[in-house]
Image (cartoon, helix red, strand yellow):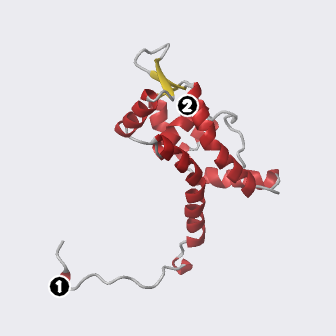
Amino acid sequence: MAQRSGAAAQPIRTAVTADEGIDFSIIELMYFAYRDFTSDPDQILAEYGFGRAHHRVLHFVNRMPGLTVAELLDVLKITKQSLARVLKQLIDAGYIVQVQGPRDRRQRELYPTPKGRTLTLALARPQSRRIDAALEGAGETERAWVERFLKAMVNPELRVQIDHLPGNTPGKDHGE
């Protein structure tokens, strides 16, 4: 790209503040919480040569056995190409099996193997411990508020996906 007047771009040396109507405090807390929430699983995944995409696939296949590839694409909001690479690695390594759909032979249903379930639980345990520690001392009201906040962070048209997770019933409050 061409530089104007031959001058190099100057760095901005002042921080952007909340004065501009942006809630940087919550944004930063979300970044730090996500960093730490994913840090333990990231270490485990690295031992297997896997990454966060593998974690997400394993998580949802384990939570919803029989999920079709099309449904998984819808949940993860990723491209077929992105999923194909990750899914192939998980299938080839014996963490997930793919079977032909009973009603539609073109559909491929995904199921965890015992090995896949074991890895998924190993990834979820430190995350669950972190959540338990964060909610320590919180009552049902506070937990419901956290659930309501997190669900509200999801795009409104996609919130229905939450109702289809195991343990949730359509129309369940989730703190709403």
CA gap between label 2 and label 1 equals 57 Å
Query: In the figure, 88 relative to 131: above or below?
Result: above
In terms of secondary structure, where does tag 1 sit?
Answer: helix
Q: Position of residue 71 (x, y in %)?
A: 49, 31
Residue marked by disc 1: 6
Quarter-of-image position of residue 77: top left
Whether residue 155 is visible:
no
Q: Which mark is residue 27?
A: none
Is residue 83 shown left or right of residue 71?
A: left
Choose mark 2 or mark 1, whichever is in front: 2
Is residue 78 shown left or right of residue 172?
A: left
Q: Residue at x 70, y 49 (%)?
A: 129
Residue marked by disc 2: 116
Mark 2: amino acid = Gly
Q: Residue furthest front?
A: 47
In terms of secondary structure, where does tag 2 sit?
Answer: helix
Q: Position of residue 86 (x, y in %)?
A: 41, 37
Q: Position of residue 57 (x, y in %)?
A: 50, 37
Q: Quick one: 100 or 126, which is closer to the camera? A: 126
Q: Quick one: 135 or 94, which is closer to the camera? A: 94
